[in-house]
Amino acid sequence: MAKTGNPVPDLRVLPDRFLPHRYAGASGDFNPIHVDPESARALGQPSNILHGLYMMTVMARAVAEVGDGDPRRLKRLAVEFKAPGFPEKELSVQGRVREVEDGVAQVEAKLVQDGGDVVEGKAEVSAKA
Amino acid sequence: MEKSWPAVDYEVGREKIREFVEAVQERHAIHIDPKAARKAGFRDLVAPPMFAVVYTHRSLWPAIEDPEVGIDLSKMLHVGQDFRWSAPVCAGDVITTETELADVQEGRKKATYTFESRAHNDRGDETVHATWTMMVLGG
């Protein structure tokens, strides 16, 4: 079981150019800001942006590793979307176990791209499935 | 303003789980191989936690797009998300989700809308309690 101060195991992913299109199909969210660079530019973004909920899946995978990667142990994940994320740039998760109480690890994590925090999150990972 | 919308059903399909798992590059075998899922004690292929987005989608969107709520989608930013998971979701489950608008905070330059979705499976067990926070910029 995780101990206080343990880091979240390193996770880095490189979302490819068409990841937002595959996530749109999988999730049902076809908002043009995610799939059409021109629409995104009209809204003031340099290009189409990643779905926030896709970025949250990356964080969910990383923090679940605190429970040995068993997805059943992830009981809660609450995030704030701080800045847009972009395809074709690496995302990495950094985090640590803040405390462990009654068999539940309280985890703090952030998702970083280009040196900036794009998502901040708090998770609860249980010792049992 | 507070408002709720009728419950919406979603039938979880194996291939939809696989499509989602492939898109988000989940690696755990219980999401990919029904035999591995059964060996781990599940009825069938297990949806990853974030699959909650897929089965609650149909319940959330009528709420966000309701003219009575009055959100301008072109000015909406998804600023926060909270998922509290309970029973696992497997292929073959029928998940029923209800969404309500729980809170609206209106400021001078922005408004913040909080939607709550609660979902349960066809055995009556809650699968997820989701809180969606949307900020709408402008007057």
Image (spheres, rainbow, N blue to C red):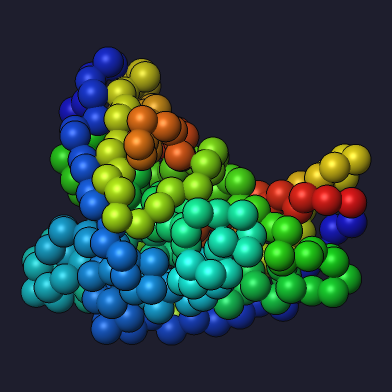
Q: Is residue A64 left or right of residue B124?
A: left
- Residue A4 coordinates in the image, percent (x, y): 28, 16
Q: Residue at x 23, y 49 (%)?
A: A13
Q: Residue at x 88, y 71 (%)?
A: B68
- State the quadrant of the N terminus of chain B: bottom right
Q: Nearer the viewer, residue A75 or B63?
A: B63
Up-down relation of residue B78 to residue A100 (above or below): below
- The answer to whether residue B50 shows anywhere in this view is yes
- The answer to whether residue B82 shows anywhere in this view is no
- Residue B113 coordinates in the image, percent (x, y): 75, 52
Up-down relation of residue A117 to residue A37 (above or below): above
Q: Residue at x 63, y 64 (%)?
A: A42
Q: Nearer the viewer, residue A88 or B41?
A: A88
- Residue B26 coordinates in the image, percent (x, y): 22, 60
Up-down relation of residue A4 to residue B137 (above or below): above
Up-down relation of residue A21 to residue A95 (above or below): below
